[in-house]
Amino acid sequence: MARDDAPWRPSRLARAGKIGDALERVLIPPVRRAKKLGFPYTAPTTPRGVEVPPDEPDLGADYDTRWARRTPARVVRRGLVNGPIRLMVRAVASPQVFGLDRLADLRRLEETTPLIFTPNHHSHLDTALMTVAVPEPWRSKLVVAAAADYFFDKRWKAVLASLSLNAIPIDREVTGRKSSDMIRGLVDDGWSLVIYPEGGRSPDGWGQEFKGGAAYLSSRTGAPVVPVFIDGTGSIYGKGMKRPRAGTTKVVFGQPLVPLEGENTRRFAARIEAAVTALGDESLNDYWTARQRARRNASPTLTGPEYTGWRRQWALSERRSLGTTGQRRRQKRRWPNLGD
């Protein structure tokens, strides 16, 4: 019970109100004086009857990422990739990288050849995995083609993607002239590119048909295409999963490809997809078996069986059980009790 002779003290709300009044007395007069000064201290006024054109769009495919390739941003990104991102990838994905010997000839060249890496795409984890798995000298000058409508629709997402992953916005449906011109300029400056030919993450754990963007960019820039197969990220953090589940992954690099004389974009894109398909078979079996199947055009497809529903998911679980990637502790399948 409070004593009657206890000294009165103002409440916290009253003290906060006094602080707010004091700040108002200090800040409002300078603001009023600035308004009286007018332009350029305040926004310019618009005469009546004059229609002001809308501001130029600066998000989506129009977001300018040049600042992310300047020295200060590159220093910050190198610290992020070699620090938090690498630790996160190791903790969540435990990647094993294969096929780096197929890039040995290009690594021995005196002048670095820019490359276009074309992995399959099952998870947001794929990009972080690629920034760690791609070897030097390409890792330090690597840009990632990201969907303009997803990663660059809000400013904070655009800044985060540009700074941490050196992402550039592209239209996932078609490679427009503006995007291709930008990528060509980057390749001419020695930058390599990660682009997902499927256009987006797998919706059900199986792969999707490849689009022709990577083949078109390679034909236009002259940069060789390196097929890449990523195995295991769909089980760890696939589309629709709310949180990642730690597991193991494989990243398999293939032999660099260049367009053949007279080969159009569609045929080159099909050849890139066939190379990634063979790498997927190699990740589950061995190199010799995968090459023998590829020679007979008998490699298991990345897109999975044509039927839908539970049979498609069952086939996916059978495929995943063949490899060592995915969950660390694979749950034992339990058959339903159908009675006697």
Image (cartoon, helix red, strand yellow):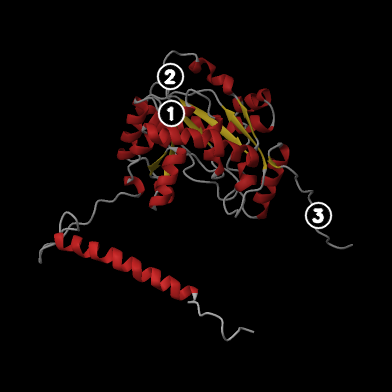
Residue 45 in view: no
Q: Give the quarter of the image for residue 216.
A: top left
Q: Secondary structure at mark 2?
A: loop
Label 3 sits on residue: 335
Q: Quadrant of the N terminus?
A: bottom right
Q: Residue at x 25, y 51 (%)?
A: 56
Viewer-nearest residue: 331 or 288:
331
Q: Give the quarter of the image for residue 310.
A: bottom right
Q: Secondary structure at mark 3?
A: loop
| Horizontal arrangement in the rendering, residue 245 relative to residue 340 (left or right) | left
Callout 2 amino acid: Thr
Label 1 sits on residue: 141
Q: Where is 154 relative to 17, above or below? A: above
Q: Tag 1 or tag 2, which sits nearer the N-term?
A: 2
Viewer-nearest residue: 88 or 337:
88
Viewer-nearest residue: 194 or 41:
41
Whole-angstrom CA distance, mark 3 to mark 1, is 50 Å
Callout 3 amino acid: Trp
Whether pointer 2 and pointer 1 mark residues with C-beta atoms closer than 8 Å, the reply is: yes
Q: Which mark lies nearer to you, 2 or 3?
A: 2
Residue 68 position within the rendered picture, expressed as x and y whole percent measured from the top left: 38, 37
Residue 43 position within the rendered picture, expressed as x and y whole percent measured from the top left: 19, 58
| Horizontal arrangement in the rendering, residue 332 relative to residue 30 (left or right) | right
Q: Secondary structure at mark 1?
A: helix
| Horizontal arrangement in the rendering, residue 240 relative to residue 289 (left or right) | left
Q: Residues within 10 Å of mark 3 (few under 14, many from 20)?
A: few
Whole-angstrom CA distance, mark 2 to mark 3, is 55 Å
Q: Residue furthest right?
A: 340
Label 2 sits on residue: 112
Whole-angstrom CA distance, mark 2 to mark 1, is 10 Å
Callout 1 amino acid: Lys
Residue 154 in view: yes
